[in-house]
Amino acid sequence: MEEHAIRTDIFQYDKAFLAYKSCNNDHERLSRLNHTFLKQLQDLGLFYRQDQVTLVGDIGCGDGEATITYLNNIEFKGGLDIRAMDKLAQFAGTHQSSVKNATSEGEKGLANETFSKAKQSQVIPLKNYQVNFGDMLEVDVAHLLYTDEEIKESMNRFNLVYLSHSVYYARDQHKNGRYGVTNLLDSVATDLLADDGVAILFHAGLEFDTVTSISYYTRSLIHDIVPTEEECNRISVTHIISNSSRELGLTYFEIPYKFELYFSKDCKKYADVFKDPSRYHELQNDPAALQDLYKIIFIAHRSPDDLYTDHSSRGLNNLVDKVLDCIKRNDSITLSASMQVILSRKASDEFKQKIETAVKQCQNKFGD
C-alpha cells in the first residue's frame, strides 16, 4: 500500500485518532486549566507536606505522557508516587502489575517507559510508580491501584486521581452488575480519595454543539442532528458523570472549556474528493489533505465505504458538507469539553468550600 493511502473498507481508528489528536489544542487547553487548578490547590497547602508523598492515581493512563504534563511545575514537596492503569497492553504491559512482574520493555508497556524516564530525569519529583494492566469494567479500580497490603491496612490514600478521556469506556455494565460509570465514580470517591483528595476528569460531551452532534448523528446515536435533553443525559459522558455524581450523593464541580480542531487552509477545495472513496488516491501526494480526511472519518467513526453507500442524511456526502460548513475563518472548528471535579465522601465542609473557591476562579478565567 502506498505511504499516504487510506483504507476505505474499514474504520482505521488509530490513524484517524492520531490525525484528530495531532491537530487540536485540547491537550494544551486542559493542561493549562489543570495547572491553574493545581496551583490553587497548592496555595491551599495541599502539596506542601514535606513528610508525605503525594499519591496520584491515573485511570486510563495511555502512554503516561499526559500525566507527566499535568504534574509538571507544581511543587510537590514530599515527592510523588504514581499508580497508573490502562486496559491496553501497549500502554500498561501484559501483567496486572507490570512494574513488579514484567521482564522486558515490550511487556512493561509505554507508560512504564515514560515514568521510568521521568524518575531518572526528575522532570517531576517522582519517587515511585506502578503501572497495572486491567479493565475498569472487569476489576474494581481499587484493586488495580492499591497493593494487597494497602487494601488490608486502609484505603482512602490518594491525593489526586486523574480520569482523562477514560470514562467513555465505562459506559457498559461492570462485571459486578452495576452500571460501569456509577461503579467507577463510587470506587474513586469511596475507596481511592483521601479526605482531602481530588479527582479530576477531562472529557468532551454531547452538547448542542454542531460537530459533536454531527458525529453522534452520523453514528445513529441520536435521532436528529440537534440532540434532545434526554439524549444528552443518556449518551454524553459529561452529562453521565454529573448525573451519576448526583445520584451517588458526591460533591461535584464542573468547569466547561472550549478547544479548536484545525484543518488545512486548502481543505474545502478537496470536498468532492472527500465524498468519493474511489478518488482517495488523489490525496496520496498531499499529506495535509489526507489528514483532513482522517479527521472527518474520525468524527464519523465509520469506514469510508460504509459512509459512501449510505445515501441518507447520515452518509458521507452530508457528513463532508456539514463538517466543512463548520470550519471558521481561522481554519478550525470549536469543540466543547469539561473538567469535572469529584471529592471524597469524607471531605470536610471546610475543604469543600476551598475547592469551590478554586473552581470558581478557574471558571472565571477559562469560561467562554
Image (spheres, rainbow, N blue to C red):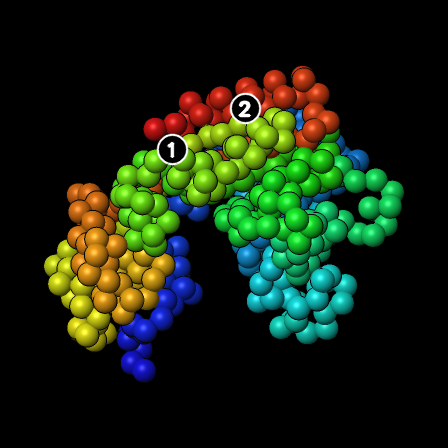
Q: Is residue 289 visible?
A: no
Q: With respect to residue 100, does 209 lie above or below? A: above
Q: Which of the two labelled residues, at mark 1 and mark 2, occupies the earlier sequence position? A: 1
In the image, 12 versus 290, the foreground residue is 12
Q: How many numbered badges does the structure rendering display?
A: 2
| x then y, percent, for residue 310 | 24, 62
Say which residue label 1 marks: 229
Q: Nearer the viewer, mark 1 or mark 2?
A: 1
| x then y, percent, for residue 266 | 16, 57
Figure quadrant of the N terminus? bottom left
Q: Which mark is residue 202?
A: none
Using a 10 Å C-alpha cutoff, classify the residue at mark 1 as few (fewer than 14 neighbours), some (14 to 19) or many (20 or more): few
In the image, 161 versus 13, the foreground residue is 13
Question: Which residue occupies 34% across, 28% down?
Answer: 368
Instruction: Identify the image quadrant of residue 40.
Output: top right
Question: Which residue occupies 77% across, 63% down?
Answer: 100
Q: With respect to residue 21, does 309 lie above or below? A: below
Say which residue label 2 marks: 358
Q: CA distance from mark 1 to mark 2?
A: 29 Å
- Toward the bottom, the furthest residue is 1
Query: Mark 1 is on which residue type?
Result: Glu
Assign a secondary structure to mark 2.
Answer: helix
| x then y, percent, for residue 226 | 28, 39
